[in-house]
Amino acid sequence: MYGELVIFSGNANPELARKVCERLGVPLGRAKVGRFSDGEVRVEIQQNIRGRDVFLIQPTCAPANDHLMELLVMAEACKRSSAGRVTAVMPYFGYARQDRKVAPRAPITAKLVATLLEAAGIERVLTMDLHAGQIQGFFSIPVDNLYAQPTLFRHIRDELLTPDTAIISPDAGGVERARSYAWRLGAGLAILDKRRSGPNEAEVMHIVGDVSGRRTILVDDMIDTAGTLVKGAGALRKHGATDIFGVATHAVLSGPAISNIDGSVFESVFVTDTIPLSAAARACARVRVLTVAPLFAEAIRSIHFNDSISRLFLDSDDNE
C-alpha cells in the first residue's frame, strides 16, 4: 500500500483536475509548472511526496508537444522526490492516431509516447477513449482505458432520446461504439460509408440504414476539424433526418472546426471536458460540454485503494 493520495496538474487542463480533487475531497497538490526564459519546461514540486501515491492529470492536447513534455518532466520530478508510485492521468492521449504503419517509412507515434512515459518513471496510465484499443499493448505497465459512454449515454437517454431516434456511426470503424449505444437505448442504427482522401478529409458516399423522418445522433471518439462530422450531418439531412445531434468524447476542435460547426445543420454537439475548450468553442452556442470528472475521480480512488475499476467500463448508472 502506498502513502496518501496526491494529485498534481500541469497546464493542459487544470479545471478538470480541480473538479476531480473536489470530487475526491483532497486538495490539488502544490507544484509549479512553468518555463525557463528559453522556453524549456520548469517544474518544482512544492510539498513532500516521499512514499506518496501520485497522480498527474495532464491530457496531451494542443499544444501537444508542450503538454507532453510537461508531463514527462513532472513525472521525472516526482520520481526524484521519492514518490511511491506515479500514475499519468491522460484524459486525452495525444499522438494516438498514428498507431500503426499506414505507409512506408511512417512512424508509430503512439508507441513512441508509450516509451517516453515509461522512461520518465511513470508506472501506470489512466486514460479515456483511446483512438485505438491496441495502444494499450504498446506499454509494459498497466493501462486503464476508461470510456466516456456512461456520461454520454445518460445525457442521450435523459435529454435527447425519442421513439424515432437513430444512432449513427460516422464510419465503419465506429460501428461497435454506435451499436452499443443503439442497443442500450433501444434506438435504430445507421452507418455512414465514407472515403477518406487525406488527413481530416472525407467524403460521405452512402448511408446504410433508415434515417428518414428520424432524430439522428452521430457518435464519435473525437472531433478534430469537424469537417467529416459536418459532411455526415449534411448527408443525413439530405436523406430526410430531422433533428441532428453530435456526440463525441474529445473536443480537439482544431483549425476551422468552430466555423464548420456554426455553419452546419447540427442542433447541438455534445463533448466532454477531457480537453478544455478554446474561447471560440466556449462562445459557440452549438457546442455543449459534459464533465467526466466523476469517472476519473472514482477511477483514481479505486486505483489508490487497490479496488477493481472494471465497473467503470460498463454503461452503469452507479457512477453518478
Image (cartoon, rainbow, N blue to C red):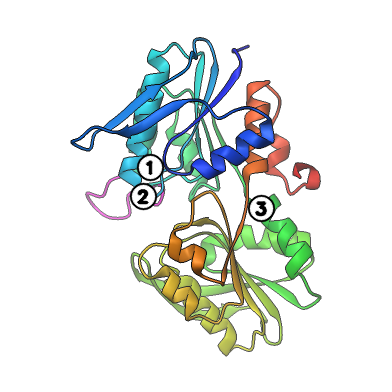
Q: Are marks 3 and 2 in contact (CB under 8 Å)?
A: no
Q: Is residue 3 magenta?
A: no
Q: Amino acid at mark 3?
A: Gln
C-alpha distance separating marks 3 and 2: 23 Å
Q: Which mark is residue 98?
A: 2
Residue position marked by numbered label 1 in the rendering: 110
Amino acid at dot 2 = Gln
Mark 1 in CB contact with mark 2 (< 8 angstroms) = yes
Say whether residue 298 is visible. no
Dot 1 falls on a residue whose secondary structure is: helix
Which residue occupies 56% across, 51% down? 273
Q: Residues within 10 Å of mark 3 (few under 14, many from 20)?
A: many
Residue 31 left/right relative to 37: right
Comparing labels 1 and 3, the label whose residue is closer to the camera: 3
| Residue 124, placed above or below residue 185 | above
Kind of element beneath mark 2: loop
Q: Looking at the image, which residue is at 68% across and 28% down?
A: 302
Prevailing secondary structure class for the magenta stretch in the rendered image: loop
Give residue 223's position: percent from left, percent from top: 48, 62
Q: Given the image, on which type of amino acid does mark 1 rest? A: Ala
Residues drawn in magenta: 96-107
At horizontal 79% and vertical 42% (from top left) the residue drawn is: 318
Q: Is residue 269 above or below residue 91?
A: below
Q: Nearer the viewer, residue 219 or 274?
A: 274
Which residue is at a point 56% across and 72% down the rendered structure image? 285
- Which residue is under mark 3? 149
